[in-house]
Every structure is written in structure tokens, then in C-alpha cells.
Amino acid sequence: MASDQPASRTGGPAAHEELARGVDATAGQQRPDEAAGRRRTAVVTGASSGIGEATARALAAQGFDVVLGARRADRIDTIAAEIGGRAHRLDITDQDSVEAFAAAAGPVDVLVNNAGGAKGLAPVAEADLDDWRWMWETNVLGTLRVTKALLPGLIDSGDGLVITVTSVAALSSYDGGAGYTSAKHAQALLHRTMRGELLGKPVRFTEICPGMVETEFSLVRFKGDAERADNVYAGVTPLVAADIADIVAFTATRPSHVDLDQIVVRPRDQAHDGRVNRRI
Ligand SMILES: NC(=O)c1ccc[n+]([C@@H]2O[C@H](COP(=O)([O-])OP(=O)(O)OC[C@H]3O[C@@H](n4cnc5c(N)ncnc54)[C@H](OP(=O)(O)O)[C@@H]3O)[C@@H](O)[C@H]2O)c1
């Protein structure tokens, strides 16, 4: 099969035998960016809070040139100044904004599709169409817009990586959650489909499916009702944003033949069926 993989990274039967013996045949070989003597650039969408902010910090600590995008420009400006990154206002529901952001970002090696969230917890019979529209526009079409804009550059980098933060909501359903779970399923399928469509191109795809992470997520879901948001985490030890950022940083620093395909991570207090252990 034709491959755009740089020759130095393709391996072959001998390399695979070495890998099977626990020897990384690609260790010590240079990535295209290393050969060119440049830092790798990582775009993080939704970098103004929660998982995105922690991810921007973790990737900067790994030496990446980090480009932060979100609507709250004041927040990303402050974070970028602290980590030596670059901030550009981004609304992933707006095509012009996405195009301007992509042009400002320049060549990109890693894209973290993180921007997203939930609105409301109404049963389907009482669904708020505006909430559903927000969730689909942001999680699904927003991920599509940003990925489409950056994919050619990610492939041109010779070693691109797309990490999409979906959710355990992309793996199951729960009462009151259909707007969010359907959007996360759709976002996940868009991401997983590219893994096959781009097979043979030098780009990797990693889906991270977190369970409960304490961020501004519930505050957004409950439209600023802090008491209701706090109750989500009452008596539970949830994940924190830095836990997911660690996983992103680990993923982004694997050798280019390694594709961490799908990572599911929950707090110890949350079972696979969504039940939580509350100590109250
Ligand atoms: N927290 C959890 O329990 C959990 C679990 C599984 C998956 N997730 C997923 O993790 C991702 C990050 O969420 P989080 O928990 O870190 O929540 P968060 O603190 O509310 O962060 C959401 C981020 O998305 C950005 N965003 C929202 N709409 C946007 C838009 N139109 N354009 C650009 N950026 C936008 C927000 O920035 P601005 O408002 O400044 O634009 C913010 O930076 C989301 O995709 C969420 O669905 C969260």
C-alpha cells in the first residue's frame, strides 16, 4: 500500500520483530520536525478553562508551541502569557472565526479537539431545541469545522496527531442526557471514521473518553446554577482537569508509529454504568 509515512519511520518486518522483542526500532530516529530542528505546534480548542486549560499547560511543559483557542479571549491571553503560548480568539460554531484561527495558528502538528459541553438535563419529551442545537453545533459541527481546517497541515507535518476529547457519554446513554450523549456519539463517530479514511497518511487519531471531571462543565450545563453544579460532585472524588491533560501529554509524546486509539478514564468512584459512589 502507498504510504506518506517518512521512510525512516516505516519499520518493516525486521523492525516489527524487534518491537515484538520489546526493542523500539524507531527509538533514536528523528521525527520530521526534529530533523528540521523545530518545536512541534499544538492547537488546543476550549483552552480558556477546565481540561483545555490544563492541556495547554501540560503540552507547554513538554516543550510544545501551544496555540490556545476559545471565545473568552481575556482568559486565553492570560494563560498564554503564563506558559509562553499563543492565544487567538476562536468560536468553533463560526466558520469565519475558525478560518481566521487556522490562518493565525500556521503549521500544526497536534490538534486537541476539546471545546464542547452540555446544556440542560431534560428528558427527550421536554427537550429544549436551543440546548440541543448548542450541543450539536459545538461538539459535532465545531469539531468538524476545526478538524477540516487543520487536517491538510497536520498531514503535511509528516507526523500529525488529532486528539478528540469525547466522553463516556459517547459510549452509552442516560436519562435526561440524550442531547449530550447523541452529540458526543456523533462527535466520536466523526473522529473514529477519520482513523480509517486517513489510513496510510502520516496522521494519528486518539479519542479520550473521560467520565466525571470537575471543571466548569456542570456550571455550563446548568446555566450558571452553582449549587446544582456542585451537587454533581458532592461526596465523590472526581477526576480533575490535570488528570486528562496528563493523558494528552503522554499521547502526544509517543513515537509516531504508536496510535493510542481510544482511552476511557473514569474516577475510581464512578462505575461503567454511570453509578457513582457518594460518601454522603
Ligand atoms: N467535565 C466532565 O465531566 C467531562 C467529561 C467528559 C468529557 N468532557 C468534555 O471535555 C471537554 C472540555 O470540557 P470541560 O470539562 O473542561 O468544561 P469547561 O471547563 O466548561 O470547558 C469547556 C471549554 O470549551 C470552550 N468552548 C465552548 N464553546 C465554544 C465555542 N463555541 N468555541 C470555542 N470554544 C468553546 C469553552 O471556552 P469559551 O467559553 O471561552 O469559549 C471552554 O474553554 C468538552 O468537550 C466536554 O464535553 C467533560
Image: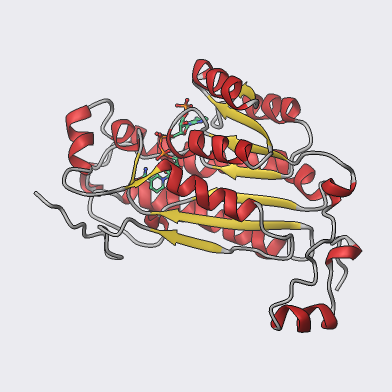
Q: Which residue is drawn at 21% across and 49% down?
A: 236
Q: Quadrant of ligand 1?
A: top left
Find residue 165 and report its horizontal and vertical position in percent: 50, 48
Q: Residue at x 60, y 55 (%)?
A: 251
Give the camera-side residue of 176 and 14.
14
Q: In the rendered image of this protein, does residue 2 appear above or below residue 92?
A: below
Q: How many marks?
A: 0
Find residue 47 and report its horizontal and vertical position in percent: 52, 32
Q: Residue at x 84, y 65 (%)?
A: 9
Image quarter hosting the N terminus: bottom right
Q: Specify whether residue 115 is in view.
A: no
Instruction: From the viewer's perspective, tell me whether residue 163 is left or right of residue 213.
Output: right
Instruction: From the viewer's perspective, tell me whether residue 3 is left or right of residue 90.
Output: right
Find residue 109 and report its horizontal and vertical position in percent: 74, 44
Q: Specify whether residue 172 is in view.
A: yes
Find residue 143 and report its horizontal and vertical position in percent: 57, 42
Instruction: From the viewer's perspective, tell me whether residue 23 is left or right of residue 80.
Output: right
